[in-house]
Amino acid sequence: MSATKQAAALTPLDIAERKNGAPLACLTAYTTPMARLVDRHCDVALVGDSVGMVLHGLTSTLGVSLEMMIMHGKAVRRGLAHALMVVDLPFGSYEQSPEQAFRNASRVMAETGCAAVKLEGGATMAPTIRFLADRGIPVMAHIGLTPQAVNALGGYRVQGRGEDGHRIKRDADAVAAAGAFAVVLEKIPEPLARAITTDIDIPTIGIGASAACDGQILVVDDMLGVFTDFRPRFVKRYAELAQEAEIAIASYVREVRERRFPAQTHVFDEALGADGVETSS
Ligand code: KIV
């Protein structure tokens, strides 16, 4: 790893300094090729535990292990040069104690080369965030709808409506005071997200929150139309890649069955000589 490459990469401090600045563009990534694409445009690449549902077919994020996060983190690291890499701490790897969180977060950082971790939870997790931040582990917090708590929350419903908004506001204050460098606000009412963004002094990154947030994040497979099992209201599809892939796969199968693939350009002569040009795309 060259020093130049590391110097060019965004740091948690750079992200924190974008409070009230140009909006932060963030996406998830789980593989090297997708990380390369995200890196060309985004400020933050999150190796989200959504990987369990998006790539592994799990029905929630609860079954995601530390080993899965580390494996996908290593793959993403190889594709990044510019964006800040953040890795999610999976369910069960940090809630028990600040010490457990430190042990697992430091392992994730050492083995993947990420610069920060993300964990779910507000006021309850504030002592853990403080513990990690004081020991050199930058933490992105995640409040509002916290998918790892789906069973306790009774589903993936909007959080912080009416009086419950005070709880989310307290969570935002607590994680900011504990030293989180940024906070994800997921699926909360727009006016609440706007008010929190105005009130706290760390960047808010919205997903189903508000355009007033300091940044936005989406699951990359959702916005590309690759993951189509369900579509939350907060997802805007910028492409329909699953449909395109289906058309391409059907064409391939048709050509194989009709012996139209491979064509002469895809096979090799018996004579020694140039094997043709290998293209990179
Ligand atoms: O796991 C994930 O992808 C996330 C984002 C949606 C914020 O936590």
Image (cartoon, rainbow, N blue to C red):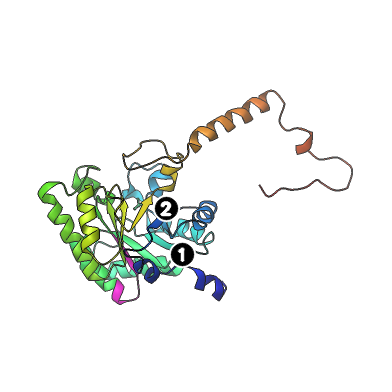
Q: CA distance from mark 1 to mark 2?
A: 15 Å
Is residue 117 positioned above or below 255 on the image?
below
Residue tagged 2: 28
Pick whichever of labels 1 and 2 is earlier in the sequence.
Answer: 2
Is residue 7 positioned above or below 146 on the image?
below
Magenta-tinted stretch? 133-141
Residue tagged 1: 112
The mark lying in front, picked from 1 and 2, is 2
Give how far across and how far down residue 65 sits, in percent: 37, 55
Q: Is residue 202 visible?
A: yes
Q: Secondary structure at mark 1?
A: helix
**In terms of image quadrants, where is residue 100?**
bottom left
Give how far across and how far down residue 268 sits, in percent: 81, 40
Which residue sits at x=31%, y=39%?
Answer: 233
Looking at the rendered structure, the kind of residue marked 1 is: Thr
Circle 1: is it few (<14), some (14-19), or many (20+) Cα within 10 Å? Answer: many
Q: Secondary structure at mark 2?
A: strand
Task: Mark 2 and ligand 1: say if the CB distance to the nearest ligand atom is below 8 Å.
Answer: yes
Is residue 272 positioned above or below 79 on the image?
above
Which residue sits at x=32%, y=59%?
Answer: 214
Give how far across and how far down residue 257 sits, in percent: 66, 24
- 137 drawn magenta: yes
In the image, taking residue 60 as reference, residue 84 lies left or right, namely: right
Quarter of the picture holding the N terminus: bottom right
Identify the disc placed on residue 220. none
Looking at the rendered structure, the kind of residue marked 2 is: Thr
